[in-house]
Every structure is written in C-alpha cells, then in structure tokens.
Image (cartoon, rainbow, N blue to C red):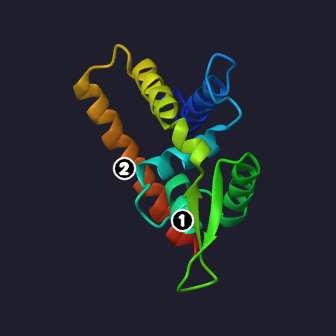
C-alpha cells in the first residue's frame, strides 16, 4: 500500500474537525472534543457521568479532559456536581441551557453523518466500521504492552 494509513486517518480527522468548527454550523462555540462530550452527556442524561467516563469515550488523558470540562463549564454548558456518597467524585451534568439546544445538536450530528456517508453502501460502511473497531483494539493492545 502506497498510502500511509495513519496519515489518511489524521487527515480525515482534521477535515471533520474543520467542517464542524465552520461558520455554517450552529453552536460553533464548541470545538470537536467539546461537541463529543456534549453528545455523550445527551446520550447518557439519566446516568451519573464522571470525568473518567468521558476520558474513556474520547480517548483523552485526564489533564486534557479537565481542560475541556473547564472550558465547557465556563461556557455554561455543564456543571460539576459533587457526589453525595464520595466527596472526591464529581458528576458532570448538562445545564438547562444545553438541554434546550439538544435537538439542534442531534440534527448537526445527523447532518454530518449523512454528509460523510454519502455514496457509501451499507455493506461498505459495515466493513469500514469493523476495520475501525479492529484498529482501535490494536492500539489499545499496543498501549497495554508499553505500560509494562
């Protein structure tokens, strides 16, 4: 293969992030990672979500996620709530402001999915997702091997 897979994935990541931060999109005040966090919180509204859950979801390290959450809190998108049973643990909650724009966020995500899957058959998309799952698993295994 003449093309570097890591270069292609990086370029694709860059294109998606650039598109999502464009002026033509609503809620451009949020970057891609913040958008991921908000989407996760929308999907898990009835659960107690802590920072670690978000780190696993996004693949970010603790310090990076702390910065992301600090920015979201400053923008009025989230609040941190101390757990009643363990004062060392904070739950991340959506603000009422964000609940009011949930529909817009879901529509934005749906538009992006439609845009990037245009002209791709269902079977090709299934293969692509299976390959992506395997790539993630390979990386996780490699990370564990280097942690020894």
Q: In the rendered view, would you say 35 is above or below 120?
A: below
- Circle 2 SS class: helix
- Residue 91 image offset from top left, x and y in percent: 57, 68
Q: Which residue is mark 1?
A: 143
- Residue 66 image offset from top left, x and y in percent: 71, 61
- Residue in view at x 62 percent, y 69 percent: 81
Q: In the rendered view, would you say 11 is above or below 86?
A: above
Quarter of the image where one finds residue 15: top right
Q: Earlier in the sequence, mark 1 or mark 2?
A: 2
Q: Which residue is mark 2?
A: 134
Quarter of the image where one finds residue 31: top right
The reply to whether callout 1 and callout 2 are in contact (CB within 8 Å) is no
- Residue in view at x 41 percent, y 56 percent: 137
Q: CA distance from mark 1 to mark 2?
A: 14 Å
Q: In the rendered view, would you say 13 is above or below 53?
A: above
Give left or right: position of 65 versus 133: right
Q: In front here: 142 or 80?
A: 80
């Amino acid at each position: 293969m003449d093309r570097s897979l890591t270069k292609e994935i990086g370029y694709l990541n860059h294109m998606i992030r650039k598109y999502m931060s464009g002026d033509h999109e609503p809620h451009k005040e949020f970057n891609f990672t913040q958008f991921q966090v908000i989407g996760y919180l929308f999907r898990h509204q009835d659960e107690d979500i802590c920072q670690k859950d978000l780190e696993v979801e996004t693949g970010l390290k603790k310090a990076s996620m702390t910065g992301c959450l600090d920015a979201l809190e400053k923008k009025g998108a989230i609040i941190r709530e101390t757990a009643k049973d363990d004062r060392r643990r904070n739950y991340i909650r959506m603000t009422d402001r964000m609940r009011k724009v949930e529909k817009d966020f879901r529509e934005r995500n749906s538009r992006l999915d439609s845009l990037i899957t245009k002209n791709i058959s269902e079977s090709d998309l299934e293969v692509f997702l299976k390959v992506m799952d395997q790539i993630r698993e390979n990386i996780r295994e490699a990370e564990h091997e280097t942690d020894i």
